Image: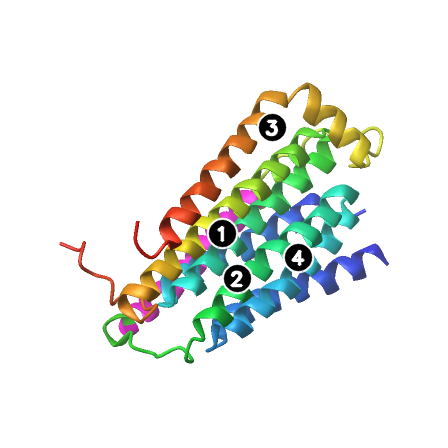
């Protein structure tokens, strides 16, 4: 039996990789991929606690997270296409018109 | 044996997640993320969440990542131009701060009191999930259908050339 702490540590490491990617990468698709990594890290935490507590609710929440991730990917990629059509670039540093 | 499996697939997940970050071309990042999702599915199976493991492969690696690769290939992107000169020095602050965050999370997790452990091993079978989803979580389930409809309309509106 694997202690739950291992799962939580793995989840923390994956979440940290996602956060680092979100702040270090400049390509907007890479930012979306980093968000997916973070969502997966959270999913792992949900499933680990669900398995340990013998409650199905955690897995239901993972199901909802999957739905939200699908919706987020669809809208995010539509935004990426709109951005590329307007600017011919996916670098987030180039889209600074709303910046103060 | 189970520990070995866990260590192997955890290392695979972390390695491919890091590979997502260090790849220059975003298509290779997406392919590496698919590898990470597959490793996560094996970890779900180790946690006896069978249904979620299958759903993770079908929905995430199958549908969402195909959407990503489709858009990447549609846009036909050049390799990542490294135009972040202004942010270069921020890495030297950001990486130590990120490691500090990891340290804080790790300390918190190690100090977690051992919770009530499962008396009977539970299997996240489709039957159990379906029962719970359509009884206790019926309203959130219906709300997600509305959410997907809104996302569908939103994606069409955003991607349309002229509204």
Residue located at (60% from left, 69% from top): B31
How crowded pointer 3 is (Cα within 10 Å; few <14, some 14-19, many 20+) is rated as: some
Q: Nearer the viewer, residue B36 or B5?
A: B36
Q: Which mark is residue B62?
A: 4
SS at mark 1?
Answer: helix
The single residue placed furthest to the left in the displayed view is: A100
Callout 2 and callout 1 share a chain: no
Seen in the picture, residue B109 relative to B139 is either above or below; the reply is below
N-terminal label among 2 and 4: 4
How crowded pointer 2 is (Cα within 10 Å; few <14, some 14-19, many 20+) is rated as: many
Q: Nearer the viewer, residue B130 or B85?
A: B130
Q: Nearer the viewer, residue A27 or B89?
A: A27
Q: Main secondary structure of the magenta part?
A: helix
N-terminal label among 2 and 3: 2
Callout 1 and callout 3 share a chain: no
x, y percent for residue A5: 65, 46
The residue identified by callout 3 is B141
Rounded to the nearest angstrom, the CA distance separating label 1 from label 4 is: 13 Å
Q: Inspect the magenta stretch and tell me whether residue B102 lies in it.
A: yes
Chain of the residue where label 1 is placed in the rendered structure:
A
How crowded pointer 1 is (Cα within 10 Å; few <14, some 14-19, many 20+) is rated as: many
């Amino acid at each position: 039996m694997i202690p739950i702490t291992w799962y939580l540590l793995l989840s923390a490491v994956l979440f940290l990789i996602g956060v680092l990617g979100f702040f270090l990468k400049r390509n907007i698709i890479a930012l979306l991929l980093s968000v997916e990594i973070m969502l997966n890290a959270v999913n792992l935490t949900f499933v680990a606690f669900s398995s340990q507590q013998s409650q199905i609710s955690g897995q239901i929440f993972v199901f909802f997270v999957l739905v939200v991730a699908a919706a987020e990917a669809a809208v995010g990629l539509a935004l990426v296409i709109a951005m590329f059509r307007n600017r011919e670039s996916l670098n987030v540093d180039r889209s600074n018109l709303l910046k103060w | 044996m189970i520990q070995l499996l866990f260590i192997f697939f955890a290392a695979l997940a972390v390695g491919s997640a890091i590979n997502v970050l260090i790849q220059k071309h975003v298509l290779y990042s997406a392919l590496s993320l698919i590898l990470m999702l597959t490793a996560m599915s094996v970890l779900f199976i180790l946690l006896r969440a069978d249904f979620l493991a299958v759903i993770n492969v079908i929905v995430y690696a199958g549908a969402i990542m195909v959407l990503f690769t489709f858009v990447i290939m549609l846009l036909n992107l050049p390799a990542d131009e490294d135009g972040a000169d202004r942010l270069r020095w921020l890495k030297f602050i950001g990486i130590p701060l990120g490691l500090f965050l990891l340290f804080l999370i790790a300390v918190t997790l190690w100090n977690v009191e051992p919770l009530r452990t499962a008396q009977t091993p539970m299997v996240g079978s489709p039957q159990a999930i379906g029962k719970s989803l359509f009884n206790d979580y019926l309203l959130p389930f219906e709300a997600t259908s509305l959410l997907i409809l809104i996302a569908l309309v939103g994606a069409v509106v955003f991607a349309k050339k002229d509204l």
